């Protein structure tokens, strides 16, 4: 165990220059105050040494993934129906009324929570999130096809297109690039009106 010169509350003194102080200060920036970090500088410093000894024999990426998971659990961030419902109920209480429209990513838990807590609210999916997923859902060749990308963007980002024209243009694009039977596009089409 390493002992460092610290203030009585475990914060590093101005002269502390060992490695670990950077991580401690970074966490303070994220947490707002040293008191909110949840560990002392000495604990950060000792953890760094333990981690270095451990990484010498284990894959570093595995450790990073484990810490990401642990961080989510520690901060209580859960993306489930219960958490979203709680959040939306608090939003309603603070705002005094439910919103008329909500735009979200395609999180299924969020969709259920909105239906339960905000039954009269229109729920739309965020076009930016949808467009970011297109590359994952089509073949690499089609993803890099400039003509396909341009046609798709011309259809979805055109604010002046009527619903009927959009439907026709969408169907023609799906047929042209053999995407009519692609499950993700079918699901997107059926969910568009929620």
Image (tube, rainbow, N blue to C red):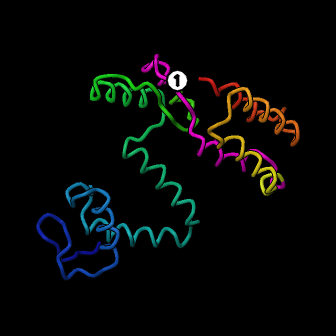
Q: Where residue 21 sits: x, y (%)?
A: 30, 73
Q: Which residue is mark 1?
A: 112
Choose between 194 and 109: the one closer to the eye: 194
Choose between 5 and 93: the one closer to the eye: 93
Quadrant for the N terminus in the image: bottom left
**Counting other residues with Cα less than 10 Å from the Cα at mark 1, is it few (<14), some (14-19), or many (20 or more)?**
some
Residue depicted at x 65% and y 46%? 131
Q: Quadrant of residue 129?
A: top right
158 to the left or right of 165: left
Inspect the magenta stretch and tell me whether residue 114 lies in it.
yes
- Position of 24 relative to 90 (above/below): below
Residue depicted at x 31% and y 28%? 90
73 to the left or right of 41: right
- Position of 52 relative to 163 (above/below): below
Q: Quadrant of residue 51?
A: bottom left
- Position of 118 relative to 60 (above/below): above
Q: Where residue 182 sits: x, y (%)?
A: 81, 35
36 to the left or right of 136: left
Q: Quadrant of residue 166?
A: top right
Residue depicted at x 51% and y 69%? 55
Find the residue positioned furthest to the left: 8
Choose between 73 and 93: the one closer to the eye: 93
Secondary structure at numbered mark 1: helix
Residue depicted at x 79% and y 57%? 146
Inspect the magenta stretch and tell me whether residue 146 lies in it.
no
Magenta residues, start to end: 112-141
Quadrant for the C terminus in the image: top right
Q: Where residue 159 sits: x, y (%)?
A: 62, 39
**For the stretch drawn in magenta, what is the main secondary structure?**
helix
């Amino acid at each position: 165990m390493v002992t460092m010169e610290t203030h009585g509350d475990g914060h590093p003194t101005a002269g502390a220059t060992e490695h670990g102080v950077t991580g401690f200060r970074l966490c303070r920036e994220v947490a707002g105050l040293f008191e909110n970090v949840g560990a002392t500088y000495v604990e950060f410093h000792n953890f760094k040494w333990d981690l270095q000894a451990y990484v010498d024999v284990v894959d570093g990426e595995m450790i990073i993934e484990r810490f990401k998971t642990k961080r989510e659990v520690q901060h209580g961030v859960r993306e489930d129906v219960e958490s979203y419902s709680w959040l939306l109920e608090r939003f309603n209480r603070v705002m005094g009324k439910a919103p008329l429209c909500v735009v979200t990513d395609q999180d299924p838990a969020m969709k259920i929570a909105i239906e339960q807590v905000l039954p009269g609210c229109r729920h739309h999916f965020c076009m930016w999130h949808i467009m970011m997923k297109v590359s994952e859902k089509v073949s690499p060749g089609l993803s890099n096809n400039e003509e396909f990308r341009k046609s798709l963007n011309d259809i979805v980002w055109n604010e002046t297109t009527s619903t009927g024209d959009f439907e026709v243009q969408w169907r023609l694009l799906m047929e042209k690039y053999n995407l009519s039977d692609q499950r993700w596009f079918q699901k997107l089409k059926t969910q568009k009106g929620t």
